[in-house]
Amino acid sequence: MKGIIGVENNGVAIVVMHIPERKKPVLAVRINGNENYPVATFTSEGRADWFLTMMQDFFGQKLQ
């Protein structure tokens, strides 16, 4: 997984991303397009990819 991937609604996005101080991807809430608030860490890249697939199914959106 590279970059920031997630779903967005009403200016708030739920994203999976990498941040420099952590080795594993994090789940974060993104507000105003650039304010990121990490809320959880995934146990692996594979688990982050699986979560993104489930988010896409749940929200019925294509991931950005």
Image (cartoon, grey):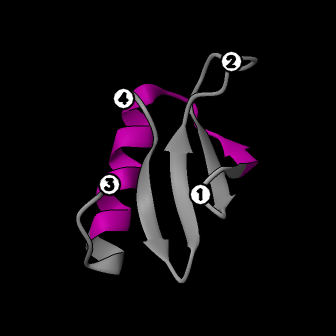
Q: Position of residue 36 (x, y in %)?
A: 71, 49
Closer to viewer: mark 4 or mark 1: 1
Q: How far apart are the two marked residues, 4 and 1, measured between alpha carbons?
A: 20 Å
In the rendered structure, which amino acid carries the disc numbered 1? Answer: Gly
In the rendered structure, which amino acid carries the disc numbered 4? Answer: Met
The magenta segment is 36-56
Figure quadrant of residue 58:
bottom left
Counting residues from the N terminus, which is met first, the one under dot 2 or under dot 3? 2
In the rendered structure, which amino acid carries the disc numbered 2? Answer: Pro
Kindly indicate whether the residue at mark 1 contacts the one at mark 2 (C-beta within 8 angstroms): no
The residue pinned by badge 1 equals 33
Q: Position of residue 10 (x, y in %)?
A: 54, 83
Q: How far apart are the two marked residues, 2 and 1, measured between alpha carbons?
A: 18 Å
Q: How far apart are the two marked residues, 2 and 4, measured between alpha carbons?
A: 14 Å
Q: Residues within 10 Å of mark 2 (few under 14, many from 20)?
A: few
Mark 3 lies on a secondary structure that is loop
The residue pinned by badge 4 equals 1
The residue pinned by badge 2 equals 20
Counting residues from the N terminus, which is met first, the one under dot 2 or under dot 4? 4
- Which label sits on residue 64? 3
Q: How far apart are the two marked residues, 2 and 3, measured between alpha carbons?
A: 21 Å
In the rendered structure, which amino acid carries the disc numbered 3? Answer: Gln
x 66%, y 59%: residue = 29
Counting residues from the N terminus, which is met first, the one under dot 2 or under dot 1? 2
Q: How far apart are the two marked residues, 3 and 4, measured between alpha carbons?
A: 12 Å
Answer with left or right where residue 32 lies relative to residue 18.
Answer: right
Mark 4 lies on a secondary structure that is loop
